[in-house]
């Protein structure tokens, strides 16, 4: 018999995880040198003017008059602004034209509650993280103060926003640090971190989040434990920072556990992602039944389950695929206006941008085929615009 050492499964998987983590770190260092930090591209004066809601000529005159942040001017005279400068200009316009302040600076006003959008589905692969990322970035680009919370232990949202969970996070640097049951609990203010995307902050995730799933059953059985019950803990943590934000976007894990239930109870609205395939729709049916049963228990225990809106968003949609079209029609027939009118297209442009951990909002328009880019971006903007309209309605805005 050959004297060959056969690794056990746990040892092999640990070795594979270590190899993959090292390779991902090398890849990130190659993509984002020299300090492995992501940066956001600048925007042309035309793009900036459109985002703010003024003419390009008006921006040029502001620059010439020395008012507001000064753009970077290339040799050919092309002016460009960072997103931070665009947000400074929004505040400048709100001061100059106070009657139109809401048009330039859309922050929530007194009496408008913090909007918390939980993006969820039981099944993996329904584009929850992509939907969360694009919604959070869309809102930040439109001038809102946004907090993204990554509740998925796989931490894909964190990675897309420039955080590598294996290397950048220490103990308690996720939401778990603010909702844990022991003396190690810390304020969410200490966990939130700025991102390269001005106006968009992040509570990152990693495998540490699974501790909440393990600790909660023990806490439920231990009557000596004090503090909020599990389904209120996420909401209580968010309340510690709510004065700093207009909208919170939560990327939920792909299972119906204590974290997801906490997010749903903390949310003011729900986005349920749907991939229009029969196996996914069947899975969603089970998800909805399980959610209903569990939430009824939570409600009887005192959980707040009044949401401003619940919307289904069709993701990875191929509009010329006949079976998919039938499923979308079925969903609209069943759920009517609860299904977003716009669908997010399955697009090589979104996939290609994701290869470098970027979104369509981050890449230059010419980096991918323009027609493909335009169609994909139009679908994403339309869906996000509908979500924003729901938020405005909840705030009582026209």
Image (spheres, rainbow, N blue to C red):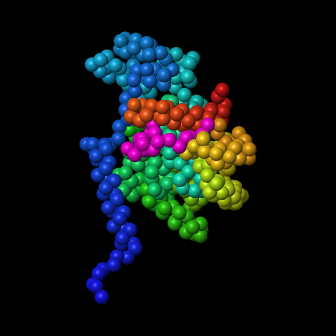
Farthest residue to the bottom: give it.
1
Can residue 106 be seen here? The reply is: yes
Farthest residue to the left: give it.
34
Q: How many marks?
A: 0
Q: Quadrant of residue 321?
A: top right
Can residue 190 be seen here? The reply is: no
Q: Quadrant of the C terminus?
A: top right
Give the prevailing secondary structure in the magenta stretch.
Answer: loop
356 falls in the magenta region? yes
Q: In front: 126, or 164? A: 126
| Residue 354 locus on image (x, y percent) | 43, 44
Residue at 29%, 81% (x, y): give it: 4
Residue at 62%, 49% (x, y): give it: 276
Q: In front: 47, or 371? A: 371
Q: In front: 272, or 332? A: 332
Above or below residue 123? Residue 52 is above
Above or below residue 292? Residue 74 is above
Position of 74 with respect to 156 (left or right) is: left
Residue at 48%, 31% (x, y): give it: 371
Residue at 68%, 46% (x, y): give it: 326
Over which residues does the magenta segment extend?
A: 342-364
Q: Quadrant of the N terminus?
A: bottom left
263 falls in the magenta region? no
Position of 56 with respect to 106 (left or right) is: left
| Residue 365 locus on image (x, y percent) | 42, 31
Position of 193 with respect to 388 (left or right) is: left
| Residue 234 locus on image (x, y percent) | 55, 52
């Amino acid at each position: 018999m050959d004297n060959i050492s056969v690794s056990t499964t746990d040892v092999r998987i640990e070795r594979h995880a270590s190899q993959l983590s090292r390779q991902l770190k090398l890849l990130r260092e190659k993509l984002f040198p020299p300090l492995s930090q992501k940066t956001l591209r600048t925007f042309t004066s035309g793009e900036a003017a459109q985002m703010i809601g003024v003419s390009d000529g008006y921006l040029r005159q502001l620059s010439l008059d020395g008012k507001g942040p000064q753009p970077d001017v290339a040799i050919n005279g092309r002016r460009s602004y960072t997103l931070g400068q665009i947000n400074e200009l929004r505040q400048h316009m709100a001061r100059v034209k106070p009657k139109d302040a809401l048009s330039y600076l859309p922050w929530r006003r007194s009496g408008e509650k913090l909007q918390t959008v939980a993006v969820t589905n039981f099944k993996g692969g329904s584009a929850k993280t992509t939907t969360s990322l694009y919604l959070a970035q869309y809102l930040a680009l439109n001038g809102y103060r946004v907090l993204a919370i990554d509740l998925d232990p796989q931490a894909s949202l964190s990675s897309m926003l420039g955080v590598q969970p294996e290397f950048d996070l220490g103990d308690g640097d996720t939401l778990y640090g603010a909702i844990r049951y022991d003396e190690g609990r810390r304020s969410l203010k200490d966990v939130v971190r700025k991102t390269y995307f001005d106006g968009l902050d992040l509570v990152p995730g990693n495998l540490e989040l699974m501790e909440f799933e393990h600790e909660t059953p023990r806490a439920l059985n231990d009557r000596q434990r004090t503090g909020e019950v599990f389904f209120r803990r996420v909401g209580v943590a968010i309340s510690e920072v709510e004065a700093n934000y207009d909208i919170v976007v939560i990327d939920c894990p792909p299972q119906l556990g204590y974290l997801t239930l906490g997010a749903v109870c903390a949310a003011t609205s729900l986005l349920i992602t749907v991939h229009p395939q029969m196996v996914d729709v069947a899975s969603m049916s089970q998800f909805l039944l399980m959610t209903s049963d569990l939430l009824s228990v939570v409600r009887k225990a005192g959980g707040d389950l009044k949401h401003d809106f619940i919307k289904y968003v069709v993701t990875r949609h191929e509009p010329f695929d006949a079976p998919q079209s039938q499923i979308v029609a079925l969903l609209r027939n069943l759920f009517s206006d609860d299904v977003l009118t716009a669908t997010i297209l399955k697009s090589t442009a979104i996939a290609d941008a994701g290869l470098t951990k970027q979104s369509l909002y981050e890449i230059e328009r010419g980096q991918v085929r323009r027609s493909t880019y335009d169609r994909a971006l139009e679908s994403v903007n339309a869906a996000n615009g509908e979500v924003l309209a729901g938020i405005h309605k909840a705030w009582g805005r026209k």
